[in-house]
Image (spheres, rainbow, N blue to C red):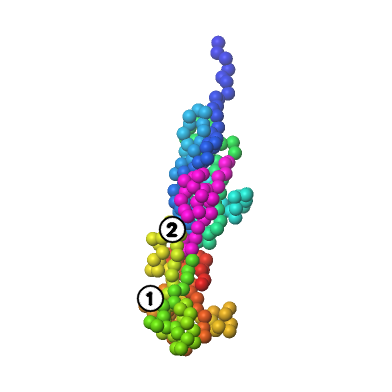
Amino acid sequence: MASSATPASVGHRPVATTNAKKIEVSGELTTGSTLQIADVFIRDEDGDPLSLDKMNNADDIKWYLVDNEAADPSGTPAATGTAFTIPADAGGKKIKIVYRIKTATGTPDSAFLPATVLLTSASSGVGGDSAADGTISNKLRSVTINVVNESGKPTDELNGTNDANTPVVGGTLEAVLECAATAAAECDVSNYNFTWQMADAGTPDKFTDLNNTNAEKHKYIIKGTEQNKLFRVHVTPKTTKATPENKR
């Protein structure tokens, strides 16, 4: 005579590792960079292996842009799944990933609750200039203008000033880009669009676009009709439409 069968046996749920490094993420914490989750570190008493394939969906991996480490990830995530491309306007923010661990085998095969990790170099191996504290760096850090006047100018005798940084008619203004260290190779001027602007010195907040006919668009030559004027340049990446403008 046989007994009735027991309920189906179960194992143990997987849980997140207690080590400092929670996940493995490739890429840089730099605007425009694509981050990819390569591994998630877990503990499973039954030895069931992780399954990133099971986790690669909108419910089990959510990426959030947050203002600081203390901020709770909530609302609509910036992305879901194992990959995330950092938006151009995310400089200065941080990233938190909310993920539910799933294993390839085992019953049950998922963690009881999702885990949350702030992406830093220590917690994920991610790179970037400010990855130590998880801050996203701007690919284009700054734009400055280098004033290249004709030799020997300006002088007080010729131009009314000896300040070498003062633009003189006939001189050239050159946009100089500084990029994040991890994106230095992308700082070539050929990767960017340049819009030169001018304002009257008496109304310094009223800039208008200039028609730059110079072959090198990152340079602008000052015309004789452009005296007592202020100049600045707007720079945007050619490959990105929505990018914060840098002004100098």
Query: Does 179 sit left or right of 112 as displayed?
Result: left
Please, what is the three-letter code of the amino acid marked with disc 1?
A: Glu
Q: Give the residue drawn at x 55%, y 47%.
A: 118
In reply to whether residue 90 is colored magenta, the answer given is no
Task: Give above or below for 29 relative to 46.
Answer: below
Check if residue 119 falls in the magenta segment: yes
The magenta-colored residue range is 114-141
Can you tell which mark lies on residue 216? 1
The secondary element bearing badge 2 is classed as helix
Q: Nearer the viewer, residue 95 or 50?
A: 95
Q: Which residue is mark 2?
A: 181
227 shown above or below 134: below
Residue 181: image location, x then y, percent: 43, 58
- Kindly report the distance in space between the C-alpha atoms of the residues bearing marks 2 and 1: 25 Å
Give the amino acid at mark 2.
Ala
Residue 220 is situated, as x and y percent measured from the top left of the image, at: 42, 79
| Residue that appears at 54% across and 50% down | 133
Instruction: Give how far across and how far down residue 86 sits, in percent.
Output: 50, 56
